[in-house]
Image (tube, helix red, strand yellow):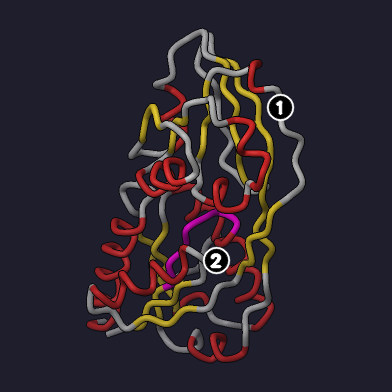
Amino acid sequence: MVRLIVIRPEPGHAGTVAAAREMGLDVAGVPLFAVAPRPWPVPDPDGYDALLIGSANVFRYGGTGLHCLHGLPVHAVGETTAQQARAHGFAVRATGAGGLQQVLAAIPAGTRVLRLAGAERVPLTAPPGVTLDEVVVYASEPRPLPDDLARLLREPAVVALHSAEAARHFAAECDRLGIDRARLALATIGPRVSSAAGPGWRAVAEAGSPADLPLLAKARDLCHTLAGD
């Protein structure tokens, strides 16, 4: 079986590696990003009706400023983010399954929405009658691809990509180190991430939703398919 490589940052990294092993995959992982909090101005909660959250990292790294916003209900991109919201004392009004734009599209007109996000984030379009402001509360800092992982990537492998930022950084590191893209297949959470990785890969498979298990299912298919080539 072809090996799966996981590069996403902690704390999600360990969970993805563990889930991949439970699926019987040969998996190696090295986080290529370190997530860190950013100083952020806490807006007046009276100016908003709801929070829009696209990553559980908002709650992991948002810091004490989050306490001022506890009265605002959360519209979360998925169940992992919703669980973190509840663990930090927030009420969850809606939980999505098909991406943050779909969550935003379901918010009724007249709602004033505050989006808390990372520095790298999906651009969104507010539906008619909904106002949307954004505040960055954390950032993912890229790291160089380590030598031991570079050696693994000189053999056929499947790489799991959870964000466009990860896709761009991974592709750039492969080019910097002279790693042949044609040996590697990518499993991504969606078209935006695939596009960010650029061309030249052996294969690219996209998950049907931005969640770990659909992504790993695509990665497993690729690992078996490439092993038989």
Please name whichever residue, 184 or 135, is drawn nearer the observer in this view of the structure.
Answer: 135
Say which mark, if any, is on residue 9: 2
**Residue drawn at (24%, 77%), measured in percent from left and top?**
224
Q: CA distance from mark 1 to mark 2?
A: 28 Å
The residue beneath circle 1 is 43
Identify residue type, mark 1: Pro
Discs 1, 2 touching: Cβ within 8 Å: no
Is 130 left or right of 220, judged from the image as shown?
right
Image quadrant where residue 3 sits: bottom left
Q: Position of residue 206 (x, y in %)?
A: 36, 55
Disc number lying in front (1 or 2): 1
Q: Is residue 200 above or below residue 61?
A: below
The relative height of residue 115 versus residue 117 in the rendered view (above or below) is: above
Of the numbered discs 1 and 2, the one sitting upstream in the chain is 2
Q: Is residue 109 left or right of residue 45?
A: left
Nearer-the-camera pick, 18 or 196? 18
> Where's residue 122, x and y in %?
56, 41
The quadrant in which the N terminus is found is bottom left
For the residue carrying disc 2, how many other residues have a C-alpha within 10 Å: few (<14), some (14-19), or many (20+)? Answer: many
Quadrant where the C terminus sits is bottom left
What segment is highlighted magenta in the picture? 159-165
Q: Position of residue 228 (x, y in %)?
A: 22, 82
The percent position of residue 143, horizontal first and vertical second, equals 67, 72
> How many C-alpha atoms fall within 10 Å of the one at disc 1: few (<14), some, or many (≥20)?
some
Check disc 1 and report its element: helix, strand or loop. Answer: loop
| Residue at 52 percent of width and 55 percent of height | 163
| Residue at (28, 79) in percent of width and height | 25
| Residue 65: mark | none
* Amino acid type, residue under disc 2 in the picture: Pro
Residue at (62% x, 52% y) in the render: 61
The stretch drawn in magenta includes residue 131: no
Q: Decide if residue 44 is on the left or right side of residue 184.
A: right
